[in-house]
Image: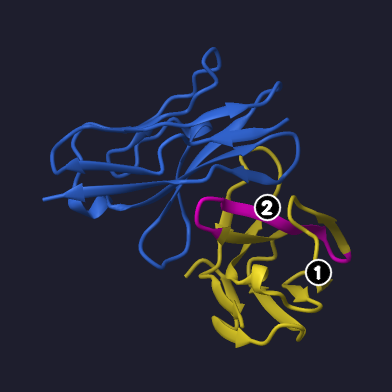
Chain colours: A yellow, B blue
Amino acid sequence: DAGITQSPRHKVTETGTPVTLRCHQTENHRYMYWYRQDPGHGLRLIHYSYGVKDTDKGEVSDGYSVSRSKTEDFLLTLESATSSQTSVYFCAMGTGGSGNTIYFGEGSWLTVV
Amino acid sequence: AQRVTQPEKLLSVFKGAPVELKCNYSYSGSPELFWYVQYSRQRLQLLLRHISRESIKGFTADLNKGETSFHLKKPFAQEEDSAMYYCALRANTDKLIFGTGTRLQVFP
């Protein structure tokens, strides 16, 4: 569809376990993003990347890390999952620059029990 | 500080009624504003952006710098417009800052 996919789409994990979500794009876009979506909060940026191995924090980065070793892949890791990290996670990609349109993946539903 | 405010969590209208979803922003420079739509359990999709000055699915939005607003309007709502709508601001970086969203319900 939009050239961006996420995996896994659904996951249930236990508190304290590490979790990695993968985002894969086929558009060779420079920018990639991880957002979380929660009722009453809308979408909040966790981390983003502006190139291979170039990443920066968003507004809710605590408890999350990211890596981007290839243009097409952007990984989000929860080092030790907590119940407050139960959320829907959206990956996105963009070209950057004026008029930058950001395209979203389908979302990953994560439940931490 | 950069901020996007969508004051209404829920907006309910009947089919054929006009719709206005409010969006206000806080940013001192020249912003780029976007509206994204999310249908039930689907990905967010770009609906429109202010620099294009386009009309998509009958929706329009005009950037009002004086009032720092970018309200989304449609003269006659349809049932298929029921969705979650997010206003977003692109400031001086390539990050998008989103509002908390407004759920639009269109009743038959």
Which chain letter goes with mark 2? A
Q: Tell me the kind of residue under disc 1.
A: Val
Q: Residue at x 82, y 60 (%)?
A: A51
Point out the stretch of residues depicted in magenta: A38-53
Residue at point 79% right, 79% down? A80
Q: Residues within 10 Å of mark 1 (few under 14, many from 20)?
A: many
Q: Chain of mark 1?
A: A
Query: Does B107 sit above or below residue A83?
Result: above
Q: Is residue B54 above or below residue A38?
A: above
Q: Nearer the viewer, residue B3 or A7?
A: B3
Q: Where residue A95 is drawn, which disc sits there?
A: 2
Tell which tag, 2 or 1, sits nearer the viewer.
1
Q: What secondary structure is found at the residue carrying circle 2?
A: loop
Magenta region, main secondary structure: strand
Image point (80%, 61%), residue name: A62
Q: Indicate whether residue A100 is drawn in magenta.
A: no
Q: Decide: is A9 above or below A45.
A: below
Q: Which residue is mark 1?
A: A66
Where residue A9 appears, x then y in whole percent? 54, 81
Q: Position of residue A98 (x, y in %)?
A: 67, 37
